[in-house]
Amino acid sequence: MLINHLKHNLKTHTTSAGFKVTNVKIEGYPIAASSVWLNVGSSQDPLQKLGLAHFFEHLLFTRTKNNPDRQKRLEEIEKHGFIFDAFTSLEYQHYFYIHSPQESKNALNFLTDGLANSIFEEADVKREKQIIFSEEKQNHNDPAAYIWRLANRGMWGEELLGKDFYGTSKTLNSIGKEDLQEFYNNFFTVSNIRFVFINSNLPDKLQDKLIDNMRMDLNNSYPFMETKTYESIKNKIVFEKMATENCQLSLSFLIKQVSNIKEKALQDFIVDYLDSGWTSRFIQRMRIEENLAYWVYSDSSNLSSTGYIRFTLSTATKNVDKILKIFKDEINQLNSLTLSVKVLEMHKTKFLSDILRNSTEYNWLMQWYGFTSVVNGKPISLDQYCSEINKITSRDILKFAKNYMTDDRFSIAYIASNKISFEMPIFQ
């Protein structure tokens, strides 16, 4: 199946000052995005300052030397019709503006101003702590949201990737203006910044000039923390007690870092086959046939030295054993049988159609090109990706399942009003 719509014009280069830039042109697409991505996230937080990366994201771009009044700066952004937002994950941050192609120069000016000229004030630091405390409580009190943090703890324990994303009251209260400035000095360097533009109408030379005009420390290195090999699950089962009627369940497999487009396409296809849409195996069996859950949600992530495949759902506690039995059956099917050509081609068509729909949504596009740039060092083009999906064979799926969907790579996290006794799945 060919998707000609996904023939995006993709170019990457490095400016004279050393900034990495990706430009994506999509003919006929009316929306543009200007974004910056950095290899730094919550896993780089010092133990005494847990929550620092996320805290920093809240305050960067708030005030700048050129626009010190926060409210006026926000008014100026919205006057242009821009959407501005930012995001922090385990290993990366990104900051972005969504705008029309005609506003590309203004958007880039706002982006570079925030990057090079942001200022931190003690009053903002103090005030934002209360916002983050509220955000953390909201996340913690929502089992469907909090299960992600709990599942990470189950997979990595107290190691870098298992640390608390939001931090604790003690660590957050210890964060001051000087910590934010040190974080900026350490990680916001030329070598650690990648710009990703979608449908910018700026000529390359002008775009590079505006980027290189930023007054930043031209340091060509930044403090990578020593990475560990996360080959073993730290907690096969991790539980947290909450006053909730249902059980929130997360089922995770630890995988290795994806090293090429073929591996990513294969991993994503398997997740889609198991859990995306009415014909996926988990939805069909757990929702349609057995009425055990409203829906099963999937999450597949690739990190610098590891990754995971994860499935989450909410169900009555009495159904947990049934859910786990279905899960075990379906994973064992992948581990022992090859899919028929008919089933394989049907799911390929469905998955490629999903990609086509997603590619019309600006946030998905920005995540795709930005995240693959950060993780892989260069963006993955969608037409290459779809080509690899078309090449997937049943043997590829069987090999992947045997390598990664195994007992020693499996962890269960759950949230319920009380501990539950259940039979742990055993995979062939």
Image: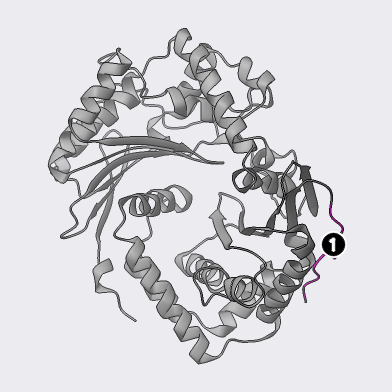
Which residue occupies the extreme top position in the image?
122
* Residue 102 in sight: yes
Q: Is residue 156 left or right of residue 283?
A: right
Q: Based on the displayed image, in which of its 4 quarters is residue 333 positioned?
A: bottom right
The residue lying toward the viewer, choosing from 377 and 352, is 352
Q: Is residue 69 above or below residue 381?
A: above
In which quadrant will I find the C terminus? bottom right
Where is residue 315 drawn, in percent x and y? 69, 59
Q: Based on the displayed image, in which of its 4 quarters is residue 170 positioned?
A: top right
* Residue 225 in sight: no
The residue lying toward the viewer, choosing from 127 and 399, is 127
First to last magenta residue range: 419-428
Q: Is residue 155 left or right of residue 45?
A: right
Question: What colour-coding does the image apply?
Answer: one colour
Q: Is residue 145 above or below residue 56?
A: below
- Tell me what residue is drawn at x 17 percent, y 44 percent: 100
In which quadrant will I find the N terminus? bottom left
Local SS, label 1: loop
- Tell me what residue is drawn at x 80 percent, y 55 percent: 236
Which residue occupies the extreme right position in the image?
421
Q: Which residue is mark 1?
A: 422
Count of marks overlaid on the render:
1
Q: Is residue 40 left or right of residue 71?
A: right
Q: Is residue 320 above or below residue 332?
A: above
360 inside magenta stretch: no
Which residue occupies the extreme front position in the image?
245
